């Protein structure tokens, strides 16, 4: 018996097509249909108030979009953008049909939630990367203003910067690989203050 996939539900929706660069959804749009991509790629991204754009994930053939699923399950509008990368073909299952399938078809429900969980994991990786970048800049600025030997634990520094110890640890290792600092248990030695200062002046998220 072959494993079931979302493609098996193509007959439950209507075919749609979008040219390269087309905007499939934007913040404020209502979730009107559950899309199953058949060919092409949909790039999902978020833009903050400062105009900085972050790519959250890409939806490939056979996949579904976690933002779309969230909209359909919660009734909330989209919070990000979806753009076609290359020509995209997909099947659009109406919101009413989607809700009916979720209620009565255990296989469909499992596929939707499995895809949802996978995307949430990817979003966690994106958030972690963003936190690392922000901490990267904040930590560089903080270290550049400290004495040559900093007698603080990584937990102390994490609390100082308002982040997690694990993020501080990864950032310190990155700085150490570049020769800017030396890390020992309970202490950090600043080796290249100028490099830290220059790094801390970069634009943040």
Image: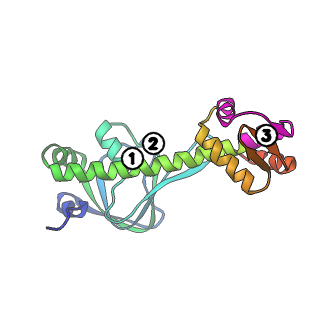
Q: Position of residue 184 (x, y in %)?
A: 73, 44
Q: Position of residue 125 (x, y in %)?
A: 50, 50
Q: CA distance from mark 3 to mark 2?
A: 36 Å
Disc 2 vs disc 1: Cβ atoms closer than 8 Å? yes
Q: Residue at point 32% right, 53% down? A: 115
Query: Residue 91 sits in which quadrant?
Result: bottom left
Is residue 155 or residue 68 the one in the foreground? 155
Q: Residue at point 39% right, 39% down? A: 77
Q: Which stretch appears magenta?
A: 138-161
Residue pointed to by mark 2 = 79
- Of circles 3 and 2, which is in front? 3
Residue pointed to by mark 3 = 143
For residue 196, above or below residue 187: below
141 magenta-colored? yes
Q: CA distance from mark 3 to mark 1?
A: 38 Å
Residue pointed to by mark 1 = 67
């Amino acid at each position: 018996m072959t494993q079931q996939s979302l493609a098996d539900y193509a007959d439950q929706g209507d075919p749609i097509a979008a040219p390269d660069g087309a905007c499939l959804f934007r913040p404020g749009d209502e979730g009107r249909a559950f899309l199953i991509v058949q060919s092409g790629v949909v790039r999902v991204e978020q833009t903050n108030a400062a105009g900085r754009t972050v790519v959250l994930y890409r939806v490939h053939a056979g996949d579904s979009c976690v933002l779309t699923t969230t909209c359909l399950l919660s009734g909330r509008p989209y919070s990000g953008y979806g753009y076609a990368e290359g020509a995209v073909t997909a099947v659009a299952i109406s919101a009413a049909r989607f809700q009916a399938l979720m209620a009565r078809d255990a296989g469909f429900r499992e596929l939707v939630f499995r895809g949802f969980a996978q995307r949430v994991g990817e979003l966690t990786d994106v958030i972690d990367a963003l936190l690392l970048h922000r901490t990267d800049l904040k930590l560089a600025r903080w270290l550049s203003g400290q004495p040559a030997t900093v007698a603080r634990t990584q937990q102390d520094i994490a609390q100082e910067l308002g982040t997690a110890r694990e993020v501080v640890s990864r950032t310190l290792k990155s700085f150490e690989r570049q020769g800017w600092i030396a890390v020992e248990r309970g202490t950090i030695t600043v080796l290249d203050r100028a490099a830290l200062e220059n790094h801390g002046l970069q634009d943040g998220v």
